[in-house]
Amino acid sequence: MNKIGLIIGREFNERVRKKSFIITTILMPVLMIALMAAPALIMTFSQGEEKQIGVIDASKLVGERLKSDETLHFELLDTSLEEARRTRMDLFGILYIAPDILENTTGVQLYANSSTSLTLEGEICSQIEQILEEEKLKQYNIENLQTILDEIETSVSMQTFRNDKSQEATNEAQSSIVATVIGYILAFVLYMFLLIYGSMVMQSVIEEKNNRVLEVMVSSVKPFDLMMGKILGVGSVAVLQVVIWGVLILGMGTFVVPHLMPEEVMASASVLEQGSALNSTSIDPEMLQAIAVMTNTAYLAKIFVSMILFVFGGFLLYAAMFAAVGSAVDNVQDASQLQTPITIPIILGLMMMLAVINDPTSKLAFWFSVIPLTSPIVMMARIPYDIPTWEIALSLVVLYASFVALVWFAAKIYRVGIFMYGKKPTLKELWKWMRYN
């Protein structure tokens, strides 16, 4: 154990003291926020130039009621379709409305002078559909129809509470939107940690093997101890990074956010946090729920403790396989093929996370959060939905037990592979190495 401790200390100090560790620790939260804001920014800046659409309305019902905006400008044309298509090449396109459009909803044609997009076509169809629906409603001879429709338009905000919790305990309000966002972020962070730090172990083994450092080290330490020390050393770096982020977020939620928000907002968020319903407020309940989560120290602590356990367990599981692959090859190019079977379950876990978020209590969600190869990512996506504690405990037990079993097989490959040079082994040869006594 003393030798393993020395290896852990070496691997830990070598990585923590690098500038890259400090930079990524600081920039990763900023990067996550940027990734969340990127879709909105892309949509904002990708609208493109305004497109001029000439309209020939044979029905006399639609053309005058089409509304222009920043992306589309409609211009009524008083010519035939053939002439407009031949002479108005300056326009983006010609929109033709058939005379029997109310009965024949396929009587709409767009003759574009350049490539169109689904967004543009969808916006045009949406406006025409709304106009036709209004025309059909007029046939019922309802006076002031548009005024009535405007008055009855209603938006509902629903507050959700967990009724299956103890009736005597505080029943905190639940927000599916907040849970979905948190689950997505946590699962994506686990995905990056498993790939980045797992690949780090593999590259470290390959470099030391090429430098013949391993041959010197195994003269005084067993290959199994060397592999375990390297895995635990790199894993402790990942855990340290999560702890730093957890302390920063807990500190901001406890001391910074309450002082930045108005007293009315914090009071309403406190009401939601205590499980009471809001009678009326001008603030979006989802926004209040997000603030309540950010200032709930117990909830955030539970999230980060779970994240540390699953980051460490998932890393141990995959790092053993990455270390075995690194010991079996001489360069990163050869490792890319052998590591494909390792990365497939990680990608599968990320894909299943998207399905699990739609129904976090389904049987599919449960089993993929128990299977050790996908459980770190899938379970972290489910935890924000306040799933039963026994499911989290079961997932952790299976995960760590699987690591103990897997590291035994990985060590067999590792102890043979670190002395093999000049040839990339096949899967059949790797299986043969695992059977050696």
Image (cartoon, helix red, strand yellow):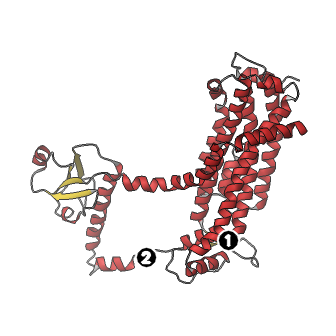
Q: Does the image show residue 293?
A: no
Residue 366 at x, y percent in the picture:
70, 53
Q: What residue appears at the point 27 percent right and 81 percent down from the top-left corner?
A: 144
The part of the image, by quadrant, that contains residue 419 is: top right
Quick one: quadrant of the N terminus?
Answer: top right
Left or right placement of residue 342 versus residue 181 in this view: right
Kind of residue at badge 1: Arg
The part of the image, by quadrant, that contains residue 223 is: top right
Q: Nearer the viewer, residue 342 or 155?
A: 342
**Could you classify mark 2 by the number of other residues whose Cα lies within 10 Å: few (under 14), some (14-19), or many (20 or more)?**
few
Task: Say above or below: 305 vs 417.
Answer: below
Q: Nearer the viewer, residue 380 or 147?
A: 380
Q: Which residue is mark 1?
A: 162
Task: Say above or below: 428 vs 138.
Answer: above
Residue 143 at x, y percent in the picture:
26, 81
Left or right placement of residue 437 versus residue 332 in this view: right
Residue 271 at x, y percent in the picture:
63, 80
Residue 421 at x, y percent in the picture:
73, 17
Quick one: quadrant of the C terminus?
Answer: top right
Q: What residue appears at the point 68 percent right and 78 percent down from the top-left corner?
A: 274
Cα distance, mark 1 to mark 2?
A: 26 Å
Q: Which residue is mark 2?
A: 154
Tell me the tag on residue 55.
none
Q: How many marks?
A: 2
**Could you classify mark 1 by the number of other residues whose Cα lies within 10 Å: few (under 14), some (14-19), or many (20 or more)?**
few
Q: What residue appears at the point 23 percent right and 63 percent down from the top-left corner?
A: 66
Kind of residue at badge 2: Thr
**Mark earlier in primary sequence (1, 2):** 2
The part of the image, by quadrant, that contains residue 402 is: top right
Q: Nearer the viewer, residue 333 or 70?
A: 333
Q: Nearer the viewer, residue 236 or 103?
A: 236
Q: Does the image show residue 318?
A: yes
